Image (spheres, rainbow, N blue to C red):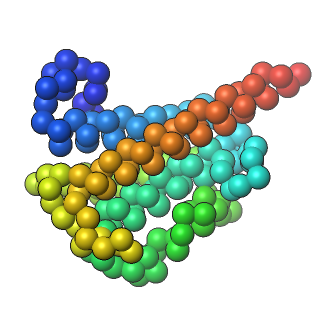
Amino acid sequence: MANPNSPELFFAEHDEQVKAFIDQHRAMLLDCLDGLTEEEARVQLVPSRTTLLGLVKHGTFVEKVWFREAPTSSSRSILGIAPNPDESFKLEEGDNIATVIAEYREEIAHTHQVLEGTTGATVFPGNKRGPLPLRWIQLHMLRELAQHCGHADILREQVLAARNASP
């Protein structure tokens, strides 16, 4: 992964820069689970389904929506994608840190394959929004990942504070 803070990326083409920033945020989202127990990863600290493990699972959903659904216009049900964002946070009994991380990494690898040979001007047939240029999708991905990395930072801070407060 290219580091967006590397001088060689400062004047790189926009497409290369945005891919580096997105990959950096994907890695930061994965890092939120580093060193946590299964219980800590699943702890629900807010009224919504948002948990650290759920955030990473939602990251997989986002990859599937934009890099499986949008390029093909296939339905979410055919692709095995949750019908809506809220459902994508739902943790199943078999979900654990290792399986959720593995599925997210698999989707990231798929995304990289989908993006080979594309530019920001490439148009995907789209999902419910209709045809969209890849540039918009990438900016949306960056917005989505940045937002969820912020959520993860706060939740992780709370989890670690609770761990350190335990006798």
Left or right of residue 48, residue 12 in this image = left
Query: Residue at the location (45% across, 48% down)?
Result: 144
Name the foreground residue: 166 vs 148: 148
Point out the image quarter for the C terminus: top right
9 shown above or below 58? above
Query: Residue at the location (23% across, 67% down)?
Result: 124
Measured from the top left, where is residue 92 in percent x and y? 65, 63
- Quarter-wise, where is residue 34 in the image? top right
Query: Residue at the location (36% across, 71% down)?
Result: 129
- Quarter-wise, where is residue 155 in the image? top right
158 shown above or below 69? above
Left or right of residue 95, residue 12 in this image = left
6 shown above or below 124? above
Measured from the top left, where is residue 15 in percent x and y? 18, 43
Measured from the top left, where is residue 63 in percent x and y? 39, 57
Point out the image quarter for the N terminus: top left
Measured from the top left, where is residue 9 in percent x and y? 18, 26
Left or right of residue 51, residue 29 in this image = left
| Label tally | 0
Name the foreground residue: 6 vs 10: 10
Residue 103 at least partly seen? no
